[in-house]
Image (tube, rainbow, N blue to C red):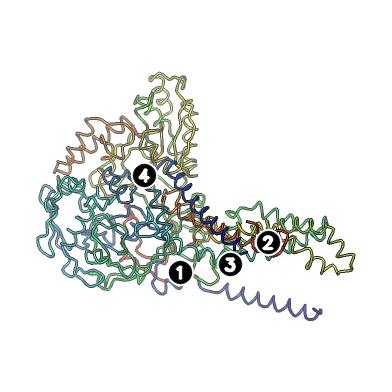
Amino acid sequence: MSWPARIFFIALSLAGLFWFHTSRQHRPTRIEEATKNKTLILGNGSEPETLDLHLATGQPEHHIFSSLFEGLVAPLPDNPDANGPGAAASWEHSPDFVTWTFHLQPNGKWSDGTPVTAADFAYSYERELTPALAADYAAMLHPLLNAEAFNKGEITDFSKVGVRVIDDHTLQLTLKGPTPFLPSMLKHYSWFPVPRHAIERFGKMTDRDTKWTRPGNMVCNGPFQHKEWRFTHSITVERNPHYWDAAAVKVNQIVFLPIQNTGTEDRAFNDGQIHATNTVPLDKTPVYRDTRPAEYHEDPLLSVYFYRCNVTKKPFDDKRVRKALALAIDRESLIKNVLRAGQKPALGFTPPGCGEGYSTPSVLKFDPVEARRLLAEAGFPDGKGFPKFDILINTMESHRTIAEAIMAMWQQHLKLPVTVLNQDWSVYLKSQRDLEFTVCRAGWVGDYLDPFTFLSIWQKGDGNNNTGWHRPRYDELMAQSCLEADPVKRMAMLREAEELLLDELPILPIYWYVHSYMLKPSVKNWLPSLLEHRCYKAVDLVPTP
Amino acid sequence: MLRFIFSRIIQGIVVVFAVIVITFMLLKLSPGGPFNKEREMQPHTREMLNAYYGLDKPWPVQLWRHIKGYATFNFPESLKMPGRGVDEIIAQGFPVSAAIGIPALLIALALGIPLGAIAALKPNSLEDRTSMVLATAGLCMPSLVLGPLIAMLFGMKLRWFNVSGWYDSTDWVMPAMTLGIIYSAYIARLTRGGLRETLAQEFIRTARAKGASEKAVVFRHAFKLACLPVLNFLGPAAAGLLTGSLVTETVFQIPGLGQHFISAAVNRDDNLAMATAAFYAALIVGFNLLVDIIQAALNPKIGFKS
């Protein structure tokens, strides 16, 4: 190539690069366009395993279901944790909170225009409770009379279960005991209706592997309907024209992106690809809290992080030892220096706001002197003679950081020979279930606004107890609370149970979660919720200058 | 040659089924199970699920069901994603991973071969040192670091490409660049080694003595032979690139196949884990066969020996 040709070639390449650079620099971001078209784009954690209401168990599914389906009771637009009309326009209950009658929306329709009837709800509950479907969340329906027996196959006649269709628009639920918190429970997706006509077009009632949840096949009753499912890419929902309150729906579409990596999600948000993130990388939370208050949000959640103790192992069978461990954890310092996302120190087990009229006993504090005294009393002055033990965690950086901090506190204040042991997720779960651990990390998320969702698991024989701990008095209080119709007395029983739990401490509560996320100011009416209930129909998009 | 290919295909099928059996055994021997969750499942529900997916049957029966399923192209369903066959999951992810893997392979070759050749032709010069330092840096750089760096520079700073997602026609560029740069480092080192060794051989001296130009010596005589180590590496490398990489897929939010290799095993979606292992084995077998054929064509000494 001659020199002039070379120079011409280089100049041409540079010009091309310059053109490319300027044209790319000035292209609008994805959310600028999306906001104009009223399309909300959200980071949603991981890919949903399924969109079958009865087979799902995860948080990503929960977010998507809030847009596609609606239970009898729905989140109120101005307070998602309050109970507003959903598929039911109104309801009443017997004075003892046992019999509940729901009056469905007169113009409630599925997204294909078929009316939503009381029979649809009865069918849904029957499907979820039928043993052959093996629905994981079926236990949520167990407060219904005889539901548990039907679910376990002890009775096979569904008409014995406390679900009665009075007419097309009236549904009566009979419970096995007083359940004042039923409306909050009904907002959980396990109580949402599924469309019989759509499910049975693709298979039997109890088929797990049919294609009824695919776009085009799926029929829903929520403010949105399923438009597109690109596996591991995105799920798009669009307005449901047949929704009873369609006029209230503000945005045209919602796109849910399964972005698992928090760093990737953070970059996507900063690049204008998504309106809201599902979470914030741990190291960014303090920075964003200070520098981007308009976008950074921190909402309390109904969720607790704690350690289980295996009380069948010596010396953890001694409550003084467990108490010493609990008192030697400096929760404030852990949150301030390690977690740094505004979590709240767990002074009890049940997170605050868990049910009207309930206050969590505030028992736990940081008191190394008392901890040392208790440990000495238990026969281990200055940790002498204490057997070596591990804190079991599932392999994840954040759990390790917390475990190491707590390990250091126990070493420093109690001189205990403690180390951290990590296992892969499924192995860790097995160790926990088989009580093959000494201390292990755990978390619990509430399903509805009532302390029962946190306290019931510590009863004898509960599948989630996994500590070996049980007390007859505790079980008695929990059983009594299920029969008590007076809400005040009921809360007093639950409180007594929690006080007993916190006195015995088979678990060491550490912190109450907050949900940290980034949200563009163009998203309006996005409100905090303890249960992460979202009232998508109220959410609006307004371009910001 | 046909006989050679045929026997290799038969061997390959045996290998793939052996991989299925081994993966099955490993999964069964590892602790935990597909239905373990943080929130404990009720015992009767677990029993039902085991019965539904045939996990209550003895191992040999389960294994036979799998082998029969694969042999008749009647693939099992994912255990964790009800309603999705493992074949559907692979068919969905593979084209995306291939759309990144093929350009990544081309980038790796386009960068690696010239870099290695320059280094080999001027041994111990500044060019040699520079290109080998670059190659070593590339080898040391994990995609977990390089990916976000590329995303920050070309995505956030220059705004040439979207930092993540799989929407636009340019979304393959950054992930392909990440993978390509890393693989180019291997290729550069292999090219340099191969070419230097070849240039020192007798027949090159003969070619030079006959008065062939340096260009002809390098490109016509030396290169063919120097490519052999690179070619050997390319078989497994191509299979690896085409099936995607967990890291680039999570860093750039790509709906590819790579993520399933890890998540299926970690989440104990045994059916999917076996399917991905079998698919990967089949690709490796295929590419190795292809490499053998090309090698035989380049170097008659190797020939078709089965």
Tell me the residue that label 2 is attached to: B295
Q: Are dots 2 and 1 on a single chain?
A: no
- Does dot 3 land on a helix, a strand or a loop? helix
Q: Quadrant of the N terminus of chain B?
A: bottom right
Q: Quadrant of residue A50?
A: bottom left
Tell me the residue that label 4 is attached to: B38
Give the class, few, some or many, for how many residues have Cα within 10 Å of label 3's Cα (few <14, many ≥20). Answer: some
Q: Are marks 2 and 1 in contact (CB under 8 Å)?
A: no
Query: Residue placed at 46% from the left, 44% from the top?
Result: B26
Chain name for mark 3: B
In 3D space, how far apart are the residues under numbered discs 3 and 4 (Cα atoms)? 39 Å
In the picture, measured across the screen, residue B274 lies left or right of residue B180, that is left
In 3D space, how far apart are the residues under numbered discs 2 and 3 (Cα atoms)? 30 Å
Chain name for mark 4: B
Q: In the rendered structure, find residue B173 and report the number of the disc placed on it.
A: 3
Nearer to the camera, A263 or B240: B240
Give the class, few, some or many, for how many residues have Cα within 10 Å of label 4's Cα (few <14, many ≥20). Answer: some
Q: In the rendered structure, find residue A91 and report the number of the disc placed on it.
A: none
Label 4 is placed on what type of residue? Glu
Q: Are marks 1 and 3 in contact (CB under 8 Å)?
A: no
Which label's residue is closer to the chain start, 4 or 2? 4
- Does dot 4 land on a helix, a strand or a loop? loop
Q: Are marks 3 and 4 in contact (CB under 8 Å)?
A: no
In 3D space, how far apart are the residues under numbered discs 1 and 3 (Cα atoms)? 21 Å
In 3D space, how far apart are the residues under numbered discs 4 and 1 (Cα atoms)? 35 Å
